[in-house]
Amino acid sequence: MNYKELNDYELLNMVYENEAASDALYKKYEPLINKIAKKMYQKNNGIEFNDLIQEGNIGLSHAIKYYDQNKNILFFTYAKLCIEKAMLSYIVGTKRQKHKILNESISIEAIDEKEALNSLDKVVKDFSLDPSKIVASKEDKTQKYSMLKDKLTDLELMVLDMRYYGFEYKEIAKLLGKDVKAIDNAVQRIKYKAKKLK
């Protein structure tokens, strides 16, 4: 059987019974994964291209596993969204780890002794706080974030994560294939949902 001649839905119906159908589907979506990975790779320094490809394949795997033909959405559209989301999640996670050390450190290139002492003073003040208050504050923020995440759509969640890590509206719009107004609308909805949690 020539699997190249089959459409997405025929391959999806065969994918769990036949490994060749699964391979054909991955091969068919390889150019799309490469195209999305190239766009994201160009916009994000410090990200490995092959890691993006791998994440794209994970996104496609998710699409194959969870696609519901009863919902009024093309498999191609759903797969593209899953691939982009997997890559974006990877980028956001990588940036989070990359900046964690920088965000929690003191500059050793202080301009003068006074600046170094001010930095040290900030750290000492943080350590002098009641540890139980620090933990409670972090737990409260984590709980609120978790509650907010449950109320957000997939798009809003991606926008929230990308804004948190410094992506501009135009960058987010380009990466997600949306216009800037759609990103701004998502941000406004996020703010509204966050206020309702207080």
Image (cartoon, helix red, strand yellow):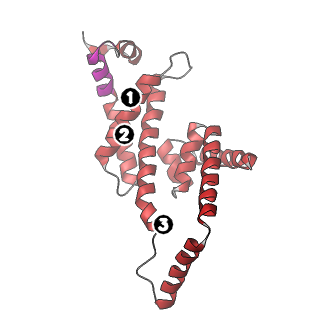
The CA span between labels 3 and 1 is 34 Å
The CA span between labels 1 and 2 is 10 Å
What residue occupies the far top of the structure in this picture? 1
Amino acid type indicated by mark 1: Ser
Query: Of residues 130 and 44, which is closer to you in this image?
Result: 130
The disc, 1 or 2, on the residue closer to the chain's N-terminal end is 2
Q: Label 3: few (<14), some or many (≥20) within 10 Å?
A: few
Q: Residue at x 58, y 76 (%)?
A: 125
Q: Label 2: few (<14), some or many (≥20) within 10 Å?
A: many
In the rendered structure, does residue 23 fall within the stretch colored magenta? yes
The CA span between labels 2 and 3 is 26 Å
The disc, 3 or 1, on the residue closer to the chain's N-terminal end is 1
Q: Report which residue position mark 1 lands on.
A: 61
Query: Of residues 159 and 148, which is closer to you in this image?
Result: 148
Query: Of residues 74 and 124, which is closer to you in this image?
Result: 124
- From the viewer's perspective, is residue 117 above or below residue 11? below
Q: Residue at x 57, y 40 (%)?
A: 155
- From the viewer's perspective, is residue 110 above or below residue 161? below
Quadrant housing the N terminus: top left
Residue range (magenta): 17-28
Q: Position of residue 50 (x, y in %)?
A: 28, 44
Q: Report which residue position mark 3 lands on.
A: 103
Position of 187 with respect to 44 (left or right) is right
Q: Position of residue 10 (x, y in %)?
A: 38, 12
Q: Report which residue position mark 2 lands on.
A: 55
Name the mark nearer the viewer: 2 or 3: 3
